[in-house]
Amino acid sequence: MHKLPANDYQRAVEDFKREWLADALVAHGGNRSRTARALGLQRTFLLRLIRELGLAERVPAPRRTNPARAGAGK
């Protein structure tokens, strides 16, 4: 059996986490709270993972609705 060096294993695990989180964030429109809930994670832990894995710039920003403009078209 071929043994991988420890750093190759760590890189593979981080790559998996990065893609898993990025896919989940995209699926939830960048909404971190909904993503954390869907993955069964605490929101603060998800935020830490996003920072640690360098996903902050890769993930779409959550869409915010402006409550003041919600009835503007009426």
Image: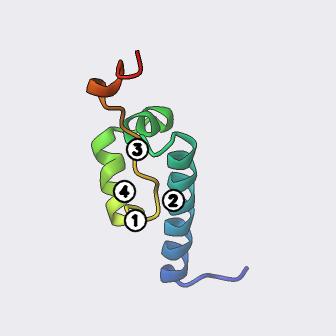
Closer to us: 66 or 1: 66
Residue type indicated by callout 4: Leu
Say which residue label 2 marks.
17
Task: Mark 4 or mark 2: name the one nearer the start of the chain.
Answer: 2
Residue type indicated by callout 3: Pro
User: Which residue is found at the position 54% from the left and 48% from the top?
Assistant: 26
User: Which residue is found at the position 32% from the left and 27% from the top?
Assistant: 69
User: Which residue is found at the position 40% from the left and 65% from the top?
Assistant: 57
Q: What kind of element bears circle 4?
A: helix
Label 2 packing within 10 angstroms: few (<14), some (14-19), many (20+): some
Say which residue label 3 marks.
62
Q: Quadrant of residue 33?
A: top left
Q: Nearer the viewer, mark 4 or mark 3?
A: 3
Marks 4/2: CA–CA distance: 9 Å
Task: Mark 4 or mark 3: name the one nearer the start of the chain.
Answer: 4
Q: Which mark is residue 28?
A: none
Q: Are marks 4 and 2 in contact (CB under 8 Å)?
A: yes
Q: Nearer the viewer, mark 3 or mark 2?
A: 3
Q: What kind of element bears circle 2?
A: helix
Say which residue label 4 marks.
49
Q: Are marks 4 and 1 in contact (CB under 8 Å)?
A: no
